Amino acid sequence: MPVQPAIKTRRSPTAPAGESKGAWRAILEQGAHLLQTSAPMSGFDVYVVGFHCAKGEPDFQMEAHHFCRVVNDDVLQCVLFDGNTKDANLIGVEYIISGRLFDTVPAEERGYWHPHNFEVLSGELVAPGLPAAAEKALMKQLMNSYGKTWHTWHTHSAGGHGGMPLPFGDPKLMWSFNRDGEADESIKQDRNEAMDIDVAKTRADRQSLLPLAEPQWGVDDMKDDFTGTTPVPGVVARH
């Protein structure tokens, strides 16, 4: 069996405001470790990293690290961070449902859920550290799925660097990219070089999933917010 490369670290771009950690923290952690439960966090061990933009705000883009729990074949729950180290900041949540479940949601709810086929077929969504077969199985499961994502802390600025020192302002409903040329090249290059991700190779491998692709709601919701973009086979709007 081939050895999987170690996951490259991505540190948060923003240090939270506040004083350094005090002695009370060691006492708290010892008590929590011995007496409290972390059961609700058990199973949040599926790690994927991709890119989000705010719906209706094409320049508001950032890298998002997802730590997810597979609830069942139709539902994943993810907590979102701005990095993958122990000091990463919690920036939001994402709920992922299958296309089958999405077809059951009320019509007025559809505008909250972004489609995932571009993220999968483009190779931009990756699961670092997973064996190739396991990552492919995960991406197959994500085909035709939808995500409802809220970012509560905007630690990345528009340029991908440090942002707000605290979670100020309203949460933002996030959206997916659905065409080549929508995601800022500098953000993609920064992540791919730092984490040693070969998107072109991944995209080529994902083409075997293309026959599974179905038209999805939301593919065209931000179409007019970008210029100079290129459609990707399998990413088709459903009307």
Image (cartoon, rainbow, N blue to C red):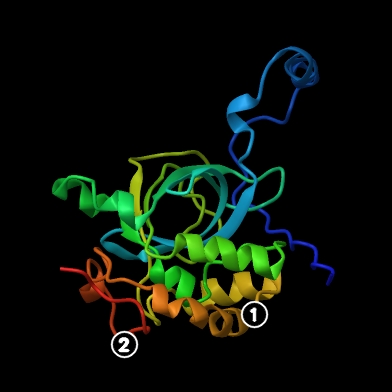
In the picture of the structure, the residue carrying the numbered disc 1 is: 198
Judged left or right of residue 162, residue 168 is left
Residue 59 marker: none
Question: Taking 194 as reference, is 129 above or below it?
Answer: above
Viewer-side residue, 232 vs 188: 232
Q: Residue at x 68, y 58 (%)?
A: 10
Q: Going by the image, does 190 lie left or right of 173?
A: right
Residue 160 in sight from this viewpoint:
no
The residue closer to the viewer here, 52 or 70, is 70
Residue closer to the observer: 20 or 135: 135
In the figure, 26 relative to 69: above or below? above
Count of labels shown? 2
Instruction: Say which mark, if any, is on residue 228.
Output: 2
Q: Callout 2, which amino acid?
A: Gly
Q: Are there few (<14), some (14-19), or many (20+) residues within 10 Å of tag 1? A: few
Q: Is residue 102 visible?
A: yes
Where does residue 209 sit, x and y in percent of width and height? 48, 76
Q: Are marks 1 and 2 in contact (CB under 8 Å)?
A: no
Mark earlier in primary sequence (1, 2):
1
Dot 2, crowdedness within 10 Å: few (<14), some or many (≥20)? few
In the rendered image, the vertical position of residue 228 relative to residue 80, given as above or below:
below
Q: Position of residue 116 (x, y in %)?
A: 40, 64
| Amino acid under disc 1 | Asp
**Element under disc 1:** loop
Residue 70 is situated, as x and y percent measured from the top left of the image, at 54, 45
Q: Position of residue 90 (x, y in %)?
A: 55, 41
Q: Secondary structure at mark 2?
A: loop
